[in-house]
Image: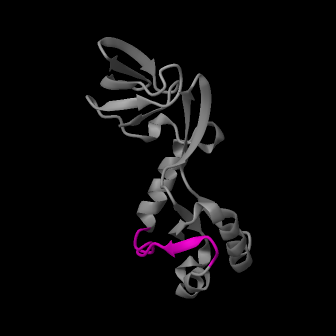
C-alpha cells in the first residue's frame, strides 16, 4: 500500500530510522527527482531537484491499517500523512510507474517525463544552451524543432534537459 507523506528535508535520515524501527527494513521510499546543470560565473553547478518538493511516496503492506499510520504519526522528520491515499492507489501506482519508466542514469527523470506542448516556451537545464529560453515549433519522436530568438534548429530530446517556464 502506497502512502504520500510530507517530510522535513533536513530530518530525512531520522525519518528513515524511525520507519525502520517501526516497520522493519521492508518499506520502500520513492521520490522522483530531476538533475539540472547550470553555469554561474563560468563554473558548472550541479543541482538535484525533488519534483514533489517536500512530499514523498512510501510503500509498506501495513499501511492499510490505521493503527500503523497512527503509530508513525510522531516520527522525527514527518510533518503529516496525506489523507485519501487509500482511495488513490491506482493513480499513485500509475504515476510512480511513469516516473520509473522515464528515469535516466542516476535515477533522475529525463525530459521525456514532461509532456511537450507545441508553441510553449521552455528553458534549457543542461548543455551549452543552459538557461536559454526557446519555443517548440514541432515535436517528433526523438527530435524537436525549436526557435531560439530568430534561429530555427533541431535538437535531440535525449541530449538536453529542459523544463517548462
Write the residue at 61% across / 71% down.
Answer: 60
Q: Is residue 141 magenta?
A: no
On the image, the x and y values in percent for residue 24 come to 73, 74
Write the residue at 56% across / 42% down.
Answer: 103
On the image, the x and y values in percent for residue 6 come to 51, 67
Magenta segment, which residues? 75-88
Vertical arrangement, residue 28 with respect to residue 35, above or below = below
Q: Nearer the viewer, residue 32 or 122?
A: 122
Q: Nearer the viewer, residue 94 or 108?
A: 108
Write the residue at 25% across / 28% down.
Answer: 119
Farthest bottom residue in view: 67
On the image, the x and y values in percent for residue 90 come to 43, 64
Farthest left residue in view: 119
On the image, the x and y values in percent for residue 99 come to 50, 48
Predominant secondary structure in magenta?
Answer: loop
Relative placement, left or right, of 116 versus 71 is left
Q: Quadrant of residue 85?
A: bottom left
Write the residue at 54% across / 63% down.
Answer: 57
Query: On the rendered image, what quadrant is the C terminus found in?
Result: top left
Amino acid at each position: 500500500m502506497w502512502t504520500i507523506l510530507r517530510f522535513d528535508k533536513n530530518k530525512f535520515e531520522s525519518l528513515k530510522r524511525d520507519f525502520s524501527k517501526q516497520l522493519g527494513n521492508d518499506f520502500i521510499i520513492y521520490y522522483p527527482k530531476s538533475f539540472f546543470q547550470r553555469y554561474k560565473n563560468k563554473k558548472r553547478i550541479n543541482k538535484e531537484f525533488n519534483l514533489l518538493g517536500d512530499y514523498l511516496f512510501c510503500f509498506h503492506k501495513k499501511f492499510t491499517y490505521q493503527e500503523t499510520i497512527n503509530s508513525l504519526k510522531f516520527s522525527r522528520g514527518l510533518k503529516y500523512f496525506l489523507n485519501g491515499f487509500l482511495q488513490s492507489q491506482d493513480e499513485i501506482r500509475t504515476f510512480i510507474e511513469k516516473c520509473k519508466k522515464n528515469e535516466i542514469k542516476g535515477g533522475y527523470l529525463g525530459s521525456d517525463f514532461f509532456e511537450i506542448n507545441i508553441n510553449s516556451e521552455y528553458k534549457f537545464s543542461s548543455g551549452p544552451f543552459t538557461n536559454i529560453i526557446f519555443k517548440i515549433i514541432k515535436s517528433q519522436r526523438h527530435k524537436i524543432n525549436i526557435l531560439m530568438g530568430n534561429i530555427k534548429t533541431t535538437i535531440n530530446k535525449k541530449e538536453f534537459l529542459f523544463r517548462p517556464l
